Image (spheres, helix red, strand yellow):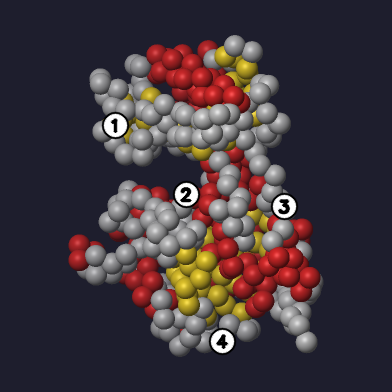
Amino acid sequence: MSRLDETYSKLTIKTGAKLVLVVLDGLGDIATRAQGNMTPLEAAATPNLDALVAQGCAQGRMIPVAPGITPGSGPGHLALFGYDPLDFEVGRGVIETLGLGLELKAGDVAARANFCTLNEKGLVTDRRAGRIATSVCERLCGILASKIKKLGTNDVIIVPGKEHRFVVIFRGKGLEGPLTDTDPNREGLPINTAEPIDPKSAAQKKVAKLITDFYKVALPLLKNEKPANGFLMRGIAHQPEIPTFEARYQLKPAALAVYPMYKGLAQLVGMTKIEGPGTIREQFERYVAEYDNYDFFFIHFKYTDKAGEDGDFAAKKKAIEEFDAALPVLLARKPDVLAITGDHSTPCSLKGHSWHPQPVLLHSAASGNDKLDRFTETGSHSGSLGIFEAKYLIRLMQAHGKMFDKFGA
């Protein structure tokens, strides 16, 4: 624990405050001429957010990791949960595996995999295989799992996720991550070879060979499938030790998320996963029902990021409007502290995550009023919160919940 964390811990007071963090994944964007010099957040009709801003809110922008660094969803969310992503590196495979409700054992190495489309030369033409239906993913994983149960003395566990995503767990002795991704991260390139991050690590070299062997057996099983005739692997790692959210903040936390990865991130830090709700309205309704049972709620909305990665400005705007339409359900049981933000920016013009600071809105009895008309990237840039690192958001939420004693005399 750092000296700063020790200080926060000593100052923490349990007040019974209710804190809610709502994350519109990939919310941040940039204005371009092609988009009418507006972002989807600026273009969207958001009467309920506008009304919340009019009541009095503090706004600002957050740097997810460090200036210029583009984060994955894992580092982006860990920062929102108050864990410095440079100190707590967690492989995406671990997060996705936990999110699917699987338990990882000591010595397990997990990878998040995407079905993809390969051309006759073995080059990736679609990294997501057209976002195949979950039922197709389940069928393909069934084929792989029935044929590949072991590689040598090591067990291989294959579990489908949503759409094109699945996880692969390698279980055996002397295995350790992390390894480099096999995903080339853009179309037109071949599948990469997984390599040890530490070239001297025998355990990582062993996993690298396992992955090479896995591809040799698995790709022929998919060669006649269309469009998912290949797969890419990311976040190949083992589960690290990490302090729990409740121990760190003295808040009993719960998570309302739909996609496995975000459930996994919540589980990784000890949040209770509340299963069942599918739409953002249902998530808010469940929050209201569970209000008395937890001190902190993490509520995740995926579709802003999905639209941004597809470069679909209209769909991202529509997703924001869908969120706004459901917001009164949450506000009917308004928490003491409400933060609305993204885990990173996913500009439509870039079709992917970016380093641009994401906007954040903070509402509480102590938030004051920045006298802004709306919650937008441009407006939040001039808000009273300024620009700060995302890892401090939870601490600011605690402060707004009056959870800190005075420091010093």
Callout 3 amino acid: Pro
Give me the C-alpha separation between circle 2 and circle 4: 32 Å
Image height of 78 relative to 215, above or below: below
The answer to which of marks 1 and 4 sits earlier in the sequence is 1
Callout 4 amino acid: Gly
Residue 243 numbered mark, or none: 3
Which residue is found at the position 45% from the left and 88% from the top? Answer: 371
The quadrant of the image that shows the C terminus is: bottom right
Work out which residue is located at the far front of the displayed protein and give it: 200
Q: Can you tell which quarter of the image residue 221 is in?
A: top left
Residue identified by numbered label 1: 189
Q: Residue 305 location in percent, x, y?
A: 42, 53
Residue 358 numbered mark, or none: none
Q: Can you tell which quarter of the image residue 329 is in?
A: bottom right
How many other residues sit within 10 Å of disc 4, few (<14), some (14-19) or many (≥20)?
Answer: some
Callout 2 amino acid: Gly
Which residue is found at the position 55% from the left and 53% from the top? Answer: 86
The answer to which of marks 4 and 3 sits earlier in the sequence is 3
Residue identified by numbered label 4: 368
Secondary-structure class at tag 1: loop
Left or right of residue 409, residue 135 in this image: left
Secondary-structure class at tag 4: loop
The answer to which of marks 2 and 1 sits earlier in the sequence is 2
Secondary-structure class at tag 3: loop
Q: Residue 237 location in percent, x, y?
A: 57, 35
Q: Residue 57 location in percent, x, y?
A: 52, 81
